[in-house]
Image (cartoon, rainbow, N blue to C red):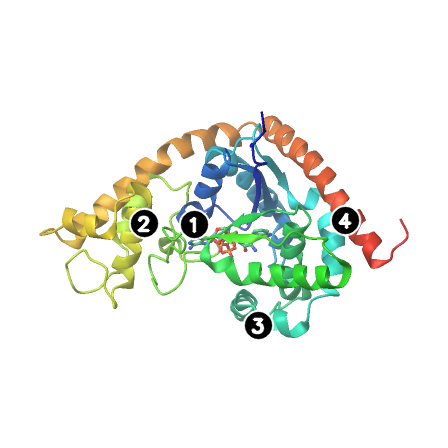
Amino acid sequence: MENNVQPKKRALSFIQSSGAFTLGNYLGAVKNWNEMQDECECIFGIADLHSITVRQEPAELRKQIYSAAAMLLSVGLDPEKSIIFMQSHVAAHSQLAWILDCYTQFGELSRMTQFKDKSQKHADNVNAGLFTYPVLMAADILIYKPDVVPVGADQKQHLELARDVANRFNGIYGDVFTIPEPYIKNVGAKIMSLQDPEKKMSKSDENENAKILLTDTPDAIMRKFKRAVTDSEARVCIGENKPGINNLIGIYSAITKKTADEITAEFEGKGYGDFKTAVGEAVVEELRPVQEKYNMYISDKAQLEAIYKEGAMKADHLARRTLSKVMKKVGYVL
Ligand code: ATP
Ligand code: LTN
């Protein structure tokens, strides 16, 4: 009989270790990663090399990297199914990044909106790493030849760059890289700040009330939702000048899987106060099992270490194969 089993697609994504994960990271990215593990062969990394584009205090960075590893496991990533590792443990990423730097134009990098935002925010430290960071991201991706890259909407431009660089390289040297497809879900793709709903919710936001952290206590979560900035209307529905309510509807919808219309019907005749309480409670319940697991993983460093070391070994094996091929194509002597 003919064997019709298709090989699994490969999916890859990374998260920066720049602080505790937010609800935006969870709904826009890592929750989807979790759901992909059965359909795809998955590779998930902690982008710790990227973190130092902004000045970090060493002890704090170390803590954040451990915390990121524990969090990835707590949301359900399973080392039996997926490769989970730290970017700095696989040297080939940095080696490929240098080569790809030479196939990326200054003008292309100057157009990256994340670079523009971050260089404004950290005007005293616009370092070369911040500028070339999208090339390291392209290397993170291309070295594993993934078919899909699940990310939040803010990473679309970086992914486009990775595709452009890959196409350029393939155009010169033949089919070396797979051209990866972005995988950006509509629901939860961009969760906005609770204090400034025109801006995305970001881990590195200094205003604690702007972001829900996955490690926040239930009290803190309820308090932050109650203080969330909304408008002066009172009807729970999507509207043009209602970014705060649109955001809360987006969060509630991503968790309960209800549509915006169903949510409007559910809160007909009720005010924003009731709605904010319901959103807060839904988030608290969603995060409860994640937090329980997190407390277990973060207190067992030996188990964490065994997992990320094993992940790095597997990732290193795959990454070296692509790097050797690239080096040969470019003309280096192996
Ligand atoms: P930083 O504040 O340090 O820039 P961040 O909160 O933007 O961090 P990243 O580590 O850059 O988080 O992103 C990890 C993943 O989470 C990416 O796939 C990104 O697209 C997604 N993501 C980040 N913020 C949001 C958000 N507000 N809504 C949806 N997805 C998000
Ligand atoms: N730039 C991304 C993090 C990141 C990434 C990657 C995402 C680094 N390397 C490879 C997907 C694939 C960010 O800021 N969220």
Task: Give the alpha-carbon distance from disc 4 to disc 3, as whole Å.
Answer: 27 Å
The amino acid on which the numbered mark 4 sits, given as a three-letter code, is: Leu
Residue at (55% x, 48% y) in the render: 148
Q: Which mark is residue 74?
A: none
Q: Quadrant of residue 171?
A: bottom right
The amino acid on which the numbered mark 1 sits, given as a three-letter code, is: Gly
The answer to whether the beta carbon of the residue marked 1 is less than 8 Å from any atom of ligand 1 is yes
The amino acid on which the numbered mark 2 sits, given as a three-letter code, is: Ile
Q: Which residue is mark 1?
A: 28
The secondary element bearing badge 3 is classed as: loop
Task: Give the alpha-carbon distance from disc 2 to disc 3, as whole Å.
Answer: 30 Å
The secondary element bearing badge 4 is classed as: helix
Q: Which residue is mark 4?
A: 323
Q: Which residue is mark 2?
A: 251
Badge 1 or badge 2: first in the primary sequence: 1
Q: Which residue is mark 3?
A: 111
**Image-based side of 332 in relation to 177, left or right:** right
| Residue 56 screen position, x and y as percent | 60, 54
Residue at (43% x, 45% y) in the render: 26
Badge 3 or badge 1: first in the primary sequence: 1
Task: Give the alpha-carbon distance from disc 1 to disc 4, as whole Å.
Answer: 30 Å
The amino acid on which the numbered mark 3 sits, given as a three-letter code, is: Arg
